Image: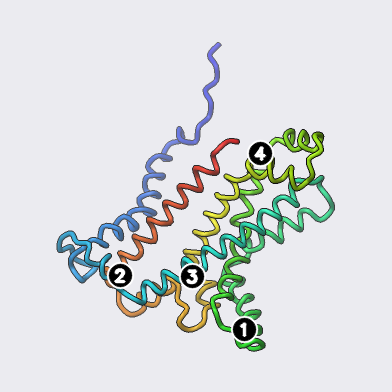
Amino acid sequence: MAKPRAFHVADLPGVGPTALFVFAGLYAPILTLVIYSFNAAPSVATWDGFTFDWYVKAWNNDAVMNAAANSLIVATLAAILSTGLATLAALGTTRRPAFFGITAIYAAINQPLMVPEIVTAVALLIVVAAIKAATGYAGLGYLVVAHTAFCIPFAYLPIRARLEGMDLTLETAAADLYASPWQSFRFVTLPQLAPGILAGWMLAFVTSLDDVVITEFIKSPGQDTLPTYMLGQLRRAMTPDINALSAALLGLTLVLLSGFFLLSRRKS
């Protein structure tokens, strides 16, 4: 008797053409943007040859460099802080027996993923405005804290997934050999967890680097990040140097997300 053939979604009629249409709709505009970032013409509507001039122009633009520096500072600090907090949260929710209220804790940690970003931005704006009025401080610290709060669930998910996939046998063996909880964590848990932590850091960094909504609400005058600077330029006129900035930001994001994907698949 012939063995029944396994069901595959790809075997359904029309799935292939539909997938091609969807991917073309998603990636054709991005590919067009990258191509036109090398356009010699000052217009984004006509092609006039290949050039790197727009990348050079963006590199020599002080406003672009200041915005890029702000983006890197905020994203790096927010990723470090959110990853540290996410690691503690993941350990606290996976390295102990289930307890009453753990579902509520999961919901609280993942709240920024479930609530529209504009709502989170308005809520943070209210708090930040009150602190600014009380202290008079208007530095980048507010952006770092706001991005940290928003990025915690993005770092938490891969770290928690890594912990849930780790065997407790080695940690139990370390305890049997009289290792303290700190020694067990440092020499057994942390080395196995490192790929998940790094993946969480990368995802948090990319999320912070690309954020527009929260940054637009929280930033003070003169604190543009690269995405908010680009948004401001688009309100005036679309020029090829914006294409170059978009392509550069896309390239950095792809590199980091590729690293996140590889680290997420890495086995202990």
The residue pinned by badge 4 equals: 165
The residue pinned by badge 1 equals: 129
Badges 3 and 1: C-beta atoms under 8 Å apart? no
Q: Type of residue at label 4? A: Gly
Q: Nearer the viewer, residue 25 or 263?
A: 263
- Mark-to-mark CA distance, 2 and 4: 44 Å
- Mark-to-mark CA distance, 1 and 4: 42 Å
Q: Where, by quadrant of the figure, is residue 66 drawn?
A: bottom left
Identify the mark nearer the N-term, 1 or 4: 1
Badges 3 and 2: C-beta atoms under 8 Å apart? no
- Mark-to-mark CA distance, 3 and 4: 34 Å
- Mark-to-mark CA distance, 3 and 1: 18 Å
- Disc 1 secondary structure class: helix
Q: Position of residue 82 (x, y in %)?
A: 62, 61
Position of 152 compared to 176: left or right?
A: left
Q: Residue at x 68, y 42 (%)?
A: 187
Instruction: Identify whether 3 is placed above or below 145.
Output: above
Mark 1 packing: few (<14 Cα in 10 Å), some, or many (20+)? Answer: some
| Colour treatment of the image | rainbow
The residue pinned by badge 2 equals: 58
Mark 4 packing: few (<14 Cα in 10 Å), some, or many (20+)? Answer: few
Q: Residue at x 31, y 65 (%)?
A: 243
Q: Nearer the viewer, mark 2 or mark 4?
A: 2
Identify the mark nearer the N-term, 2 or 4: 2
Q: Type of residue at label 1? A: Ala
Q: Type of residue at label 3? A: Val
